[in-house]
Amino acid sequence: MSIAIHWFRRDLRLTDNTALAAAAAAHDVVIPVYIVSVWPREHHWCGAPRQEFLCGCLAALAKNLAAKGARLLIRHGPAEAALEKLVRESGADAIYFNRDPDPHGRAVEQRLAARAAELGVKIHAHQDIAIHERDEVLTASGTPFRVFTPYAKAWLKLEKPAPRRAIARLAPPPDLVSDPLPTLQTWGLTSDAQIIAPGEAAARQRLGCFLDGPIRDYAATRNLPSDGASSRLSQDLRHGTLSIREVHAQCSALAAAEPRHARSIGTYVNELIWREFYMQVLWHSPGVLDHEMQEHYRGLKWRDHWRPESAPGGDAFQRWCAGETGFPIVDAGMRELNATGYMHNRVRMITAMFLTKDLHVWWMHGESWFMRRLVDGEIASNNGGWQWSASTGTDAAPYFRIQNPWSQTQRFDPDGHYIKRWVPELRDVPAPRLAQPPTPGLPLAKGYPLPIVDHHRERDVALEMFRR
């Protein structure tokens, strides 16, 4: 009897799971396992909202596997050690998994490959998280793209793999000991964020709702945080409760069936391409996690230019984190993030540029805060977005294009619906007043702070910092 291990990672689903399907096709028995990495309370790249979503996804995955005749094993510790132990217990002769695009995951895969070679166990690493990964989308000279638009044109020309069906049945695995499903207490965490529903079924429902309506107007409404135009699929792609191939295939089918909506659908597909562009940047330039992508900006004099794991202690940063800056659109975004583990993408840009260009705080501190609060925290996209806003990354916003929070409010929340939802102190303030600085010394509403900086003055400071 041939036994294989499928190591679940960022692929917490049974539908169109590349490595799982390959294991099931090639072996009599597949042992599904998830390895819980344990770290105490604080982590630079992760926090309670994302871990709570992960716990819910694993519980859903366990039920789905049970319905197929299998059982999800849970183990703790370093993945390579836990998998070696499972190989010895089960007699498995192969380990299947889907490749991770970030440097941390790649390092684990390298250590696992070394252990497997010693054990005489075959390793089968599959492409799954991205439609096109690593070296598939390159310039004519064979180098990685550094600008998005030509990358996207090249990406669109490549043939797209079709998604696979869900696993129909799995043979019962051997009787092996499993740890309990993790909870937030596994990491000593607590959370009061009201996160989105986890699991494959919830993800598929969200995809269906998006394709049934909002995607048709996506090009016109995607930048309006109050209109519900977002797909809300980012955390599902991050944790793999949805296949990126299925999302793309359904978008393509809808565009073909409804050509009048092809532009809006294409605008959404463009966002999927941005995700893979940033993954390619991280693959070829892993140093972006430690410093600015553009070398000539590595000497910028940020206010809090310390190591990212030691968060700045300044009052300005803390007020930004809490949504107490006195800039309504910024505060609404930060409060949405703290309350739900999510922030609309347009507002992510506004809040990130405010931290870097108005408060002059090093972008790595904001990058880390987002990763610790976001349910959809994706290292590549988050880093790419922060370096874009800080004007230090590939294809970044030019340093002299600094978003004005007041004019951004006028453009993207003119009626104040988004702001008033998340900043209740401002519910009775007329919308036009939310899009302009208050009278000096007079807050917009009782209990709401005055702006902590003058945007126009801080813009000049940022320009001079970059010019130097």
Image (spheres, rainbow, N blue to C red):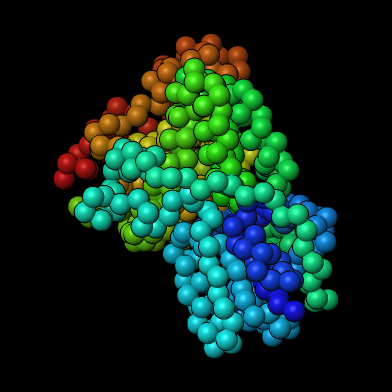
**Residue 39 shows in this picture:** no
Q: Residue at x 25, y 56 (%)?
A: 142
Q: Position of residue 206 (x, y in %)?
A: 66, 35
Which image quadrant for residue 79?
Answer: bottom right
Q: Quadrant of the N terminus?
A: bottom right
Q: Residue at x 57, y 78 (%)?
A: 122
**Height in image: 357 above or below 53?**
above
Q: Is residue 259 left or right of residue 228?
A: left
Q: Is residue 466 left or right of residue 430?
A: left
Q: Position of residue 297 (x, y in %)?
A: 23, 51
Nearer to us in this view, 69 or 34: 69
- Tell which residue pokes out farthest to the bottom in this image: 118
Q: Residue at x 33, y 43 (%)?
A: 154
Nearer to us in this view, 137 or 213: 137
Nearer to us in this view, 208 or 41: 208
Q: Is residue 218 left or right of residue 280?
A: right
Q: Quadrant of the C terminus?
A: top left
